[in-house]
Amino acid sequence: MHTLTRNIIIALTSWFLLVPVAQADTYNDTVNRFHKANQSKDFFKDAYGFAVFPTVGKAGIGIGGAYGEGRVYRGLKHVGDASLTQLSFGFQLGGQAYSQIIFFKDKRAFDEFTSGSFEFSAQASAAVITAGATAEASTKGVSASGGLTQDSNESAGEYYKGMATFIIIKGGLMYEASIAGQKFGYTPKGE
């Protein structure tokens, strides 16, 4: 089943990557974008560490998936690499690319994430940072409303079980009312 799930995600993500989107940001560029965003910038001050995924590709037609590769930092030190996979079921159509960051409030949350196979349940949510919109995304679906500027975005992330997640939409369009969860893999640097 794991191989089938991964193949579906890779196939859907590959299809979506045919849609023109901005080139993948470097890790530093992505971290800087989150550092400049009003909703996420304060988390850098007190977080024990964070994981950043410059580009996550997501696509779906009834069944969907997402995949991205990232880095994990303790403080500002790169300590390992991570992968993100997601499988979703329900009404969904389209494709999207986004950047994602997960802040770890403390060592316990960091250790839980870097245990090797961490999963966000359907209750976990992410604050979506987009210029001109306010939104909240969760593994239950997405809701959004328009705004005038990024500064008018009132969405604010909160820690859930020691982790706070933010997303910046890079391109694409996705309609969905689905149930999904994200699964993360972790490899320490140098292995």
Image (cartoon, rainbow, N blue to C red):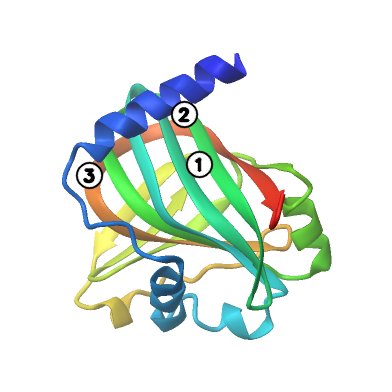
Whether residues under marks 1 and 3 lie with C-beta atoms below 8 angstroms apart, the answer is no
Marks 3 and 2 close (CB-CB < 8 Å): no
Q: Secondary structure at mark 1?
A: loop
- Residue sitting nearer the eye, 7 or 147: 7
User: How far, Cα to Cα, is label 2 from label 1?
Assistant: 8 Å
Residue 117 lies, with reference to residue 191, above or below; the image says above
Q: Residue 185's image quarter?
A: top right
Question: Label 3: few (<14), some or many (≥20) within 10 Å?
Answer: some
Q: Earlier in the sequence, mark 1 or mark 3?
A: 1
- The crowding category of the residue bearing disc 2, from other C-alpha atoms within 10 Å (few below 14, some 14 to 19, many at least 20), is many
Q: Which residue is mark 3?
A: 173
Q: Considering the numbered disc 3 on the image, is that residue within a helix, a strand or a loop? A: strand
Which residue was labeled with disc 2?
88
Q: SS for tag 2?
A: strand
Amino acid, disc 1: Thr
Q: Is residue 93 visible?
A: no
54, above or below 59, in the image? below
For label 1, the residue is 139
Residue shown at 69% from the left, 48% from the top: 187
Left or right of 187 on screen, residue 157:
left
Residue 186 point in image, percent of width and height: 68, 47
Left-right relation of 161 to 58 = right
CB under 8 Å between callouts 2 and 1? yes
